[in-house]
Amino acid sequence: MNILWDFDGTIFDTYPVYTDIVYQVMYQNVGKTEIYRNLKKSFSHTIDFYQLSKSQVSEINRLEKLVQPSDTKPFNGVKSILQQANKNVIMTHKDFAGTKAILDAHGYGHYFSDIVTIDDGFPRKPDTAAYEYLHNKHHIDLAIGDRDIDLIPAQKLGIKTCMFQGESQVADFCLPDYQQFDLVKI
């Protein structure tokens, strides 16, 4: 099975670090749970929702650059799925250097045949262009993501979809954790 993965919130649990950064920068009394929930929609949604200023966004970006690859951890069980797949590819809005640094810091880089990032110039999700490119090149059987925008492009291309840690009308199935994932049954 060839799997297309989202990165943040799907392979690595990066949202807690991003939540802490936004919480630190915001000048409002907002709980981390609410920030996390908004970040899961998207960073741009979070900016609009909290009406963050340009200086706040700049400070968030500055603090994000200080995050070390070891500050984020892979989800339990994801390594087993990566090992079982015939081929794994990533499509992420994260930049290539940041993606590669986290993968390599945790010894995951060799599991991926291809990595498409925001640096490659494809339109942002849910546009299908990057997914179509990866599908044509690697014959993708399954797309795994933690947000609908990760799954919509795959669905449009007729690729089976899996929502990780959430509910979705777009997903063929939803998975609360990777311990319950069985490639043979898909």
Image: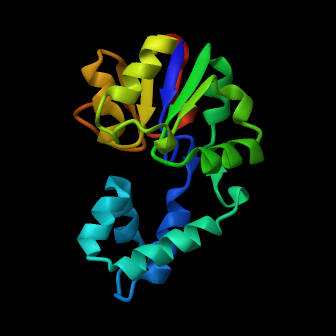
Residue 74 visible from this viewpoint: no
State whether residue 43 is above or below residue 133.
below
Residue at image point 69% right, 27% down: 111
State whether residue 159 is above or below residue 32.
above
What x and y, as percent, mark residue 7? 52, 42
Image quarter (top left, top right, bottom left or bottom right) of the C terminus: top left
What x and y, as percent, mark residue 127? 29, 34
Total labels: the figure holds 0
Q: Nearer the viewer, residue 173 or 114?
A: 114
Residue at image point 44% right, 40% down: 176
Residue at image point 34% right, 42% down: 124
Q: How is the image coloured?
A: rainbow
148 with respect to 90 (left or right): left
13 with respect to 32 (left or right): right
70 with respect to 59 (left or right): right
Q: Nearer the viewer, residue 59 or 4?
A: 59
What x and y, as percent, mark residue 90? 53, 32
What x and y, as percent, mark residue 42? 34, 55
Residue 115 visible from this viewpoint: yes
Residue at image point 43% right, 39% down: 121
State whether residue 111 is above or below residue 70.
above
